[in-house]
Image (cartoon, rainbow, N blue to C red):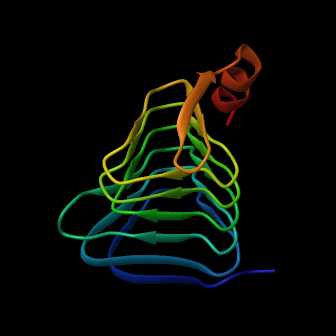
Amino acid sequence: MKYQLNCKGNVILGDNITCGENVVLDAKDGTIRIGDGVVLGQNTRITGGSENKTVIGKYTHIEDDVTITMASIGEYATLKKGASADPFVYTGDYSILEENAHMPENSKLPSRAVGEGDPFSITRGLSAEELEEAKSR
């Protein structure tokens, strides 16, 4: 089954993107850049704007019901079901934002770190297994 991707504005898509049902990419006045090999789960909404670059790094996995607004998501990152990233958020490469975690405006999740909660906090570093799983994408 094929799903429709709803893109508005200047959206730049990499190669081999997997997209679930009901995904919205709304660039408004800015640009959204999605890297190669990104997985976008169902009901994902990514909003861009002129105030900040919106970038999803290559081979990032975004699970269902995730909302990203004017944020920069690193390569090989994972945003689990129901997670949200507010404007000017940065997540590093190989980072994990756990289920239903919320990153408020201007917050940062370093590379190879795991964040959870609302508002999120850094709870631990990536395990060797999690790192290998991300690298194998």
| Percent position of residue 51, x then y | 18, 64
Give the total number of marks visible in the rendering: 0
* Residue at the image point whose x is 70% and y is 50% from the top: 99
User: Which residue extends farthest right?
Assistant: 1
Pick the residue in front: 136 or 134: 134
User: Which residue extends farthest top?
Assistant: 128
Which quarter of the rendering shows the C terminus?
top right
| Percent position of residue 29, x then y | 21, 78
Q: Measured along the vertical axis of the image, is residue 95 above or below residue 126?
A: below
Q: Where is residue 120, by image quadrant?
A: top right
| Percent position of residue 124, x then y | 62, 21
* Residue at the image point whose x is 66% and y is 61% from the top: 82
User: On the picture, is 103 further left or further right than 61?
Assistant: left
Which quarter of the rendering shows the N terminus?
bottom right
Q: Where is residue 114, by image quadrant?
A: top right
Q: Where is residue 52, by image quadrant?
A: bottom left
* Residue at the image point whose x is 56% and y is 39% from the top: 77
Pick the residue in front: 128 or 33: 128
* Residue at the image point whose x is 44% and y is 33% from the top: 92
User: On the picture, is 47 further left or further right than 130?
Assistant: left
Q: Measured along the vertical axis of the image, is residue 22 above or below residue 32?
A: below
Q: Measured along the vertical axis of the image, is residue 110 above or below residue 14?
A: above
| Percent position of residue 36, x then y | 50, 50
Q: Measured along the vertical axis of the image, is residue 38 above or below residue 43?
A: above
User: On the picture, is 111 further left or further right than 113?
Assistant: left
